[in-house]
Each structure stands twice: as C-alpha cells, then as structure tokens.
Amino acid sequence: MTIEAVTREGRTLNYGYTARYDGKDYPFPGSPWDTVSLELIDAITSKVVFKRGGKVVQTTNVTVSQDGKVLTLATSGIDSDGKSVTYREVFDRY
C-alpha cells in the first residue's frame, strides 16, 4: 500500500507498507501508526488494524461491492491527537 496525501495545511505526506493478510503486525514507517495488520473476512471484506505503542488505535473495514465498482472504508478509533473518529469513505470506479 502506498499513500500520498495532502494535509489541511498543504503539507504532502508519502508513506506505505507491505503486509500479508495474516493478522500479524507489520511496520508502517512514516505514518501516524507504528504497525498495521490485515485480515480477510470474506471474499469482499477485509479488516485493517492500526496500532501505536502496541495498542489498537484505529480499525478499518474495507469492502468491495459485488460488481467491483465501489470501495467502502468504514473507520473508527482515535486520531493522532487522541480524538475519537468515526468515518466512512466511498469510492466509485470510473
């Protein structure tokens, strides 16, 4: 996974990780988290767990629609400032 983002302040962030869908923690250098773990739930759903200091801080369920045209990310946990977050992102394939 490679992530390229722009903060509210206009700063560009680039970071990424390499991991397997085995539920084990993998380093996530340069990110707000120390580690990430991936697990396949079923054919269209996976669970991503982000940890900081060995503690789970965010969990994201990733779902691909049956037709493969919509990707949904449902995230909950705390952000890097310790504030509670819950959000849903929906991406349509063109």
Image (cartoon, rainbow, N blue to C red):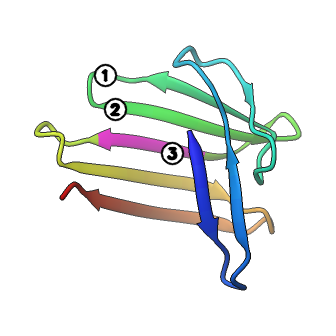
Quickly name the residue at label 1: 42
Q: What residue type is labelled 1?
A: Asp
Q: Distance between the residues labelled 3 and 1?
A: 15 Å
Looking at the rendering, in which quadrant would you find the C terminus?
A: bottom left
Q: Which residue is drawn at 72% across and 85% down?
A: 9
Asked if residue 8 lies left or right of residue 46, the reply is right
Residue 41 in the image: above or below residue 49: above
| Disc 1, SS | loop
Amino acid type for the residue under numbered disc 3: Thr
Relative to 43, residue 10 above or below: below
Judged left or right of residue 72, residue 25 is: right
Q: Which amino acid does label 2 sit on?
A: Thr
Whether residues under marks 3 and 1 lie with C-beta atoms below 8 angstroms apart, the answer is no
Query: Label for residue 60?
Result: 3
Which one is nearer the viewer's eye here, 67 or 85?
67
Range covered by the magenta-colored residues:
59-63
